[in-house]
Amino acid sequence: MTARTEAGDVVSDLVMRTFRLNGQFLAAAERIARGVGLTAAWWQVLGAVLEKPLTVADIARSMGLSRQAVQRIADLLADRGLAEYLPNPAHRRAKLVRPTEKGWDAIRGLAPDQHAWANQVTESFKVDELRQALDVIERLIEATS
C-alpha cells in the first residue's frame, strides 16, 4: 500500500471541506434562486448558457454534471418558458439551449440578492486572497480532469 504524502493529506482535507462548502453554496443558491421562482440547479443550467447557447452535453461537461440531469433540467426550463432549444448548425440532433427573455428576467431578478450575499460573505477577505483561492481551485480542476 502506498503511503499518502503530506500534500495528499492536505488535498484529502481540502476535498472534505470542499464537499461542505459546496453544500453551503448550494443552500445559499437555493435561497437566492427561490425568490425569482428558480432552483439552484435551474440557475446553474441557465448560467451556463448566458454567454452563448450550448448543447446539453456541453453544459454537462462544463458543470461536471450528467448529461441526463442537465437534459431533465433543460426540458423543465423550456417547459416553463425560461429557456428554449435552437437548431445547431454543427449537429442535427444536439440542439442548443439558450435563455428566453423570461429566463434573462429571472437571472436579472436574482442579481441583487446574489450580490448582497457575495459581498457579505467576502467582507473578511482580501481580494488577493480570493483570487489566490480561485487560482488553486482552477489548477486542481485541471489536475483532476
Image: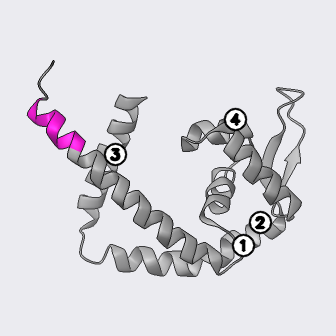
Could you tell me the amino acid type at mark 1?
Answer: Ala
Are circles 2 and 3 on residues that touch, CB within 8 Å? Answer: no
How far apart are the alpha carbons under marks 3 and 4? 23 Å
Crowd rating for badge 3 (residues with CA inside 10 Å; few <14, some 14–19, many 20+): few
Are circles 4 and 1 on residues that touch, CB within 8 Å? Answer: no
Q: Nearer the viewer, mark 4 or mark 1?
A: 4
- Residue 122 to residue 78: above or below: below
In this figure, which residue is indicated by the disc labeled 4?
57
How far apart are the alpha carbons under marks 2 and 1? 5 Å
Could you tell me the amino acid type at mark 3?
Answer: Ile
Residue 141 circle label? none
Q: Main secondary structure of the magenta part?
A: helix
Mark positioned earlier in the residue sequence (2 or 4) = 4
Quarter of the figure with the N terminus: top left
Percent x, y for residue 21? 36, 60
Percent x, y for residue 99? 78, 58
Percent x, y for residue 17? 28, 54
In this figure, which residue is indicated by the disc labeled 1?
106
| Residue closest to the eye, 51 or 80 | 80
| Magenta-colored stretch includes residue 10 | yes
- Residue 11 to residue 91: above or below: below
Task: Provide the residue span drawn in magenta.
Answer: 5-12
